[in-house]
Image (cartoon, rainbow, N blue to C red):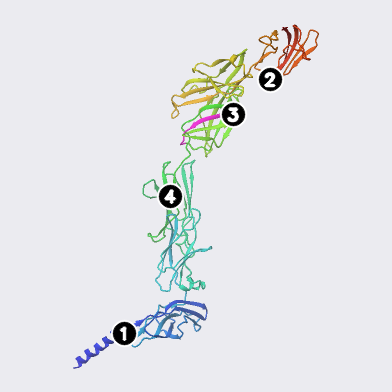
Amino acid sequence: MILRFFYLFLSLILAVNNFAQTYNAPSLTCVQRQSATLNVVEFKRPNITCGTFIAHEIYRSNALNGPYVLITSITDINVTTYNDNTISQNATHFYYLKSNYNCGAGFTSLNSDTFDDQRPQAPEVYKVSIENQKAVVYWRYKPSSKIHGYRIDWIGKDTIGRLDQRDATFFIDNNVDVNAETRLYAVNAMDSCSFRGSNSFGISGGNFPHAPILLSMVQDNCEGTINLNWTGYIGWGNQTDRDLVKEYQVLVKINSQPEKIIVKQDFNNKSFIYNGFNYGDTLCIRIKAMHPTVDSIFSHSNQFCFISEKIQKPKLLELISTRYTDKNVQEIRWYCDSNAQFKNFGIEVTDIRSGQIVKELNIPNPIVEGSGYFNFVDNTALDVNPYRYQIIFRDACNAELSGIEINSLHLKATQTGLFTNKLTWSQEIIPTQIPTTFLAYQVWVKKDSDPFQLLEILSPNILNYEHNVEKDTNYNGVFCYQIRAFYQFDTTQPIAQKTFQSWSNFGCVTQRTVAHIPNAFKRNGIHPEFKPMLIFFDGSFYNMKIFNRWGIEIFESNSLDVGWNGTMKNGSSAEEGTYIYIISYKANDGKIVTKTGNVLLLK
């Protein structure tokens, strides 16, 4: 009987519990210490439809585990803030809320989260590392419903990021140039009060800031070394010594090989000179700092990836041609293998006859033709003598290297006959120790203001040429010549078997003016006028006067085209007989020539 009653009582209890129901408490969003004696409690009301609203109840305690006491009931459903001015200045206060709705028997309110009125607990920043050339801040946190997110600060500067995520564990700073600067980072936990920006009380404080390594690198191309220097990691030490590091490791990746440790150094040694590479290797270099006590914690510096270099001197440096393209304008051409790294070039010009250096050219910016060929146009070129040219290579290490010389092709042109000009030129363009094959010489001529035209092609063993200008008497008589030599280098690679040209200076001859004066003419004959024929005459000055036997002037002309037709100044015909002429003209050499004589007028 007693046992049956016990089972019946237990069944009733279970039945009641099966019908018990709960509804939500208000959501506690912020407990903020406004002053020594005032806390502001903020919450969001729940969405409850089971019954009518009675009150929101706020409970408080000075200990997390209680006991809690009801400090107020808010009966206005629209009120979501409570000012608690009954707190103690030096105590910590804990709050939670419950709802009170008339939902009938068996309905009870859940408890809200519990918040205190202190700052949220700061996360533990355990490293800042440069990953993929981005600064990444890592931290650990203690789970807390009060933490709403995190604020990342650049110490001494600005807040650089906010994360509205309580379980976040890292932050990527996308706005720092990791090759140029390092930042001191701190991470603070934030409750919802601080996220609304009401004041800074809801932000944690007191965590140690961290700064990653900043690697700087100087590649010494003269010595073939890479000089590394870096700032120390900050943040792993204690309050007085923040830069404790177990060791620094220099990590290098060469070409496609795995990254490896080149050297390990203690925390006091923050520089290293690296030379264990071949020129042309692709290198990626960074520094790794190891935590003083925990081997699983480490931090990387920024990384430099580049192709290693050393200043290379040329294996072949040779002048290959000189070309006079105008009076005192010369194109100088040379070869310097493309692997060589030049700072600038120089050219020394030596007078072959005296052996004296007469000119030095500094060429910081030569014309780069490509494939190792360069040229420079000298607008103040010398051309009165044969000259020797030597190219000088200068690199960034201030080292100099002299190349193979070349001589200018020097032409001399002289008038040797009434209508004959003789050209002679030098043969030794390339030094005799450089095997060279000469292919041909070309003779070019420029008549007065006409363009140059090819006159003759000569075999390479001919070093002189005579030009007869008798058929060119229609010109004023200025003939300029140029010799162009064609040759190949026989053994010097990679320029062997390629044809190059050197052009001589301009050798100019101004032909002497030639005068042909007839001694008779017939008024109605084949030549009805008396006038001289002046060959190679530019017409700059001319005068002809005719006198009769008594010395009276009967005719005058200042144009070679206007001759004497046998008439007097008054227009009457002159008598048949002998007359005196005086002809003056300015010859091509600039001298005034006067010729006198007799001319016979025939009827």
Q: Position of residue 282 (x, y in %)?
A: 41, 45
Secondary structure of the residue carrying numbered label 4: strand
Q: Which residue is mark 2?
A: 539
Please state, as top left, top right, bottom left or bottom right, where the C terminus lies in the image: top right
Residue at image position (81%, 8%) is 550
The quarter of the image holding the N terminus is: bottom left
Examine the rendering and report whether any part of residue 208 can be seen.
Answer: no
Q: Nearer the viewer, mark 4 or mark 1?
A: 1
Disc 3 to disc 4: CB gap under 8 Å:
no
Q: Is the residue marked by circle 2 packed among few (<14), some (14-19), or many (20+) residues within 10 Å?
A: some
Q: Is residue 73 above or below residue 346?
A: below
Instruction: Tell me the kind of residue under disc 2.
Output: Gly
Among the two numbered marks 3 and 4 on one chain, the one whose residue lies closer to the N terminus: 4
Q: Label 2 vs label 3: CA separation? A: 30 Å
Mark 4 or 2, closer to the camera: 2
Q: Amino acid at mark 1?
A: Ala
Vertical placement of residue 475 versus 232, above or below: above
Q: Nearer the viewer, residue 421 or 176?
A: 421
Residue at mark 4: 285
Q: CA distance from mark 3 to mark 4?
A: 51 Å
Task: State the extent of the magenta-drawn residues as a range.
Answer: 329-339
Query: What residue does disc 3 label?
Result: 329
- Label 4 vs label 1: CA separation? 68 Å
Which kind of residue does numbered mark 3 sit on? Answer: Val
Residue at disc 1, secondary structure: loop
> Looking at the picture, how far across and down is residue 142, in whole percent?
40, 70
For the residues labelled 1 and 2, say whether their Cβ atoms are less than 8 Å apart.
no
Q: Which mark is residue 20?
A: 1
Q: Residue furthest bottom?
A: 1
Tell me: 481 left or right of 302. right
- Of badges 2 and 3, the one in the foreground is 2
Tell me which numbered mark, 1 or 2, is placed earlier along the sequence.
Answer: 1
